[in-house]
Each structure stands twice: as C-alpha cells, then as structure tokens.
Image (cartoon, rainbow, N blue to C red):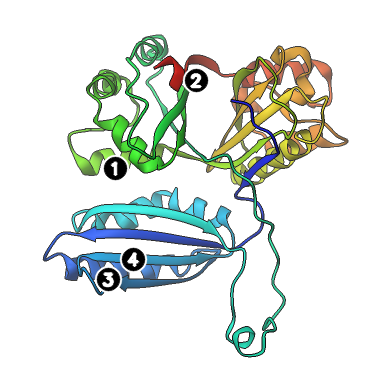
Amino acid sequence: MTISGRISQSAFDGSRLRVILLLDLYEGAQEQFLEAYELMRNQVASVPGHISDQLCQSIENPSQWLITSEWESAPPFLAWVNSEEHVETVRPMHSCVRDTRSMRYSILRETHPAQALTGRPASPAPQVEARVGDGVARHALTFTVKPGSESKVAELLAGYTSPQAQVDDNTRLRRTSLFMHGNRVVRAVEVEGDLLAALRHVARQPEVRAVEEAINPYLEQDRDLSDPDSARVFFTRAALPAVHHVVSGHEEPARLRRHALYYPARPGCGTELAKFLAQQDETAADDRDSPVYRSTVFQRDDIVVRLIDIVGELDQDPVASLGLKGPQKAAELERLLDGAAIGVEGALSTERNTNRLLSHADMLPVTDRSASDS
C-alpha cells in the first residue's frame, strides 16, 4: 500500500487526555462495583497527572456504566494504567464486570461557560493540531521466557498458522511482527478498525490458543488462559503501548526492511527515552535522505522498543537507524539508555560504540506476516 502524505500519531503532543471506559456489569453486582470504584477513585486521585474522573450510569440500561477521566497528558496516564498498582487497584472490579472497552482521546477543542455566553475563551488554551492517521491501530505485547528456552519458544512462535485476517465488516488484521531479544519476546500487531475486537478474535482461534498453551511452560510469569483473571492480569502486565507513530510524507519505497530495536532505559527514564526517539523520528520523516521511512515507538515503564521500516541494510547508516542524527543526540541517548543492560558501555559518540549498540539493540526476527500472507 502506498501512503501519500505525512502520517503522525503521538502521545507526546502535550494535549490533555480524555479516557473513556465503558463497562457492562453483571446483574446484582452494582453495590460491589461501587465499592470497588470508590477504592480506585481514592487511589487515582493522588496519581501525578490525574485531573478528574466521573462515574455515570446509563438511563436506558442500568447494567451499562461509563467512567471518564481527564489527565494532564497521555504519558502519566499510561504510566499509571500499566503499573502494578493499577493491576491491584482494579482487581476487585473483575468479578463485577461482564465486558469493558477503553478509549483514549487527546482533547483538541473545548467550550467553557464563559465562551458559550460571550463567544470568547474563558482562558487561553493550547491549540493542538489534529494529526493525520492511516486508519490503523497499533499495539504490542512483551514478556520474558525462562533462560535456555529461547530457541524452543522462537520455533513455536514462528510455526503457528495465521488466523483469518478479516475479523468483521469493519475490522481486519493487517500485520503481525514478532521479535526476540535474549529471553524477551515482543509481538507487534497492526489492525484496521477495532483493535479490541481483533485481539479477541485472535485469542479465540484454536491455532493461536494451541501455541499460547505450548509456550506456557517456558514463561517466567505463570498464567492460566482458562482462568479469565489470570489471563487478564498477564496481558495487562504484558501490554506495550504504541506511544508514537510517524510515516514520511514521501512516496513509499518499493522495498522496505522491518527491524525492531530494543532500548532499555535507565530506571525512571523510559518515558523520556521514548519521547527522545519520537522527536528524532519526527525530524527524520522530513528528511528525504533518511533511510527510516516508517517508525513506531512502543514504551512501558523502562522498556522501549522502536519498530522501523527502512530502505537498505540496517548498518548502512547506523546513526540514522538508531535515531541519533543531530548534535549532542548521542550524548542524550547515552544519558537515558541503560547501556550495561544491553551490553554497550562507554560514549556513543564513537563509531565503534554506535555500531555495537546497533548490533546489540537489533532484535531477532521470529516472524513477520501481513494480511496478504494469510
């Protein structure tokens, strides 16, 4: 598919965030749910970046509820929703809720009471520009396997039969890319339409469930996919959200190579490192000479993965491939990167260490399947 025009989606645009959670409760579970909500509300009120939240009940169907929350920006919300504290906080809700659906939106425009009466804004507000997307939702999962089992896990993950790409009239699986770095697995998916519907569709497929069951004995974190609570906790902890995606506005080259690069951050620096890489990729998207045509940055805590589609070989331009173009960029990455964790220590300004980092960060490709391969 040829994309004309620049594509850019980001959690780092500085806009406030509106989170919408739709819930369908079991009959008779309302009081238990309200108690669980009060616990969550009291805890989230002290989370940095949280502004407010509301709990609403449908006037048409009392079993349907809505929780909305507002955040200063997307990064603090993502840090909270992916934390162990959040996993434990929402656990009491699991037995109350039949189904949930979460949506996250940047706030671009709003009407204040003073504006409605006078036509003038009540106070200056940042005017965030609307971004142009490509109709594709992106998400990734990451988990670790027991040391020594890497080759067996790679064999199992590479050998599964692809599920049917068409989920429903509006949703289609477009691409699945799976990589490993040591004993860490990263699975990235691209979906046209409803991401949640696609993930549920995949999880129900017998061939996928067979592979998931086959790798269970090798996982460092135990899980029981027949237990909804165990499965929910595992996939919550494994979530690796896409925090930035950009595609060059230039014509798509005829042949692109996909790579995943692993950037373990120093403790507490994951968001800053992801934002640094996002800014670098935004700049590269305007550079006709950059080999990076498309990039997605995934981040959870101090785990950062950058998925890139490039022209030519990865090592043809190591600086561009790593996202280090520009003065002092190597020093900035050096400050944020846990070099010891990836086996690269010393100044990244030297050609030797840049090449070593590229070699050590490049993840092992296990499988990369598009809808046309299904």
Q: CA distance from mark 3 to mark 1?
A: 26 Å
Query: 10 Å neighbourhood of mark 1: few (<14), some, or many (≥20)?
Result: some
User: As rendered, which of 344 and 271 lies closer to the eye?
Assistant: 271
| Mark 3 or 2, nearer chain start | 3
Furthest residue in direction bottom, as rendered: 117
Q: Position of residue 80 (x, y in %)?
A: 47, 54
| Separation of residues labelled 1 and 2 (CA atoms) | 23 Å
From the image, tell me which residue sits under label 3. 58
Which of the 4 image quarters holds residue 114?
bottom right
**Residue type (three-letter) at the residue carrying disc 3:** Ser
The quarter of the picture where the C terminus appears is top left
Q: In the image, is residue 89 above or below residue 168? A: below
Q: Residue at x 53, y 15 (%)?
A: 364
Three-letter code, disc 1: Arg
Could you say which is closer to the camera, residue 175 or residue 274?
175
What number is the disc on residue 220? none
Where residue 66 is drawn, which disc sits there?
A: 4
Q: SS of the residue at dot 1?
A: helix
Q: Relative to the observer, which residue lies in front, 243 or 154?
A: 243
Could you tell me if the residues under marks 3 and 4 are in contact, i.e. CB atoms within 8 Å? yes
Image point 66% across, 46% down: which residue?
272
Q: Nearer the viewer, mark 2 or mark 4?
A: 4
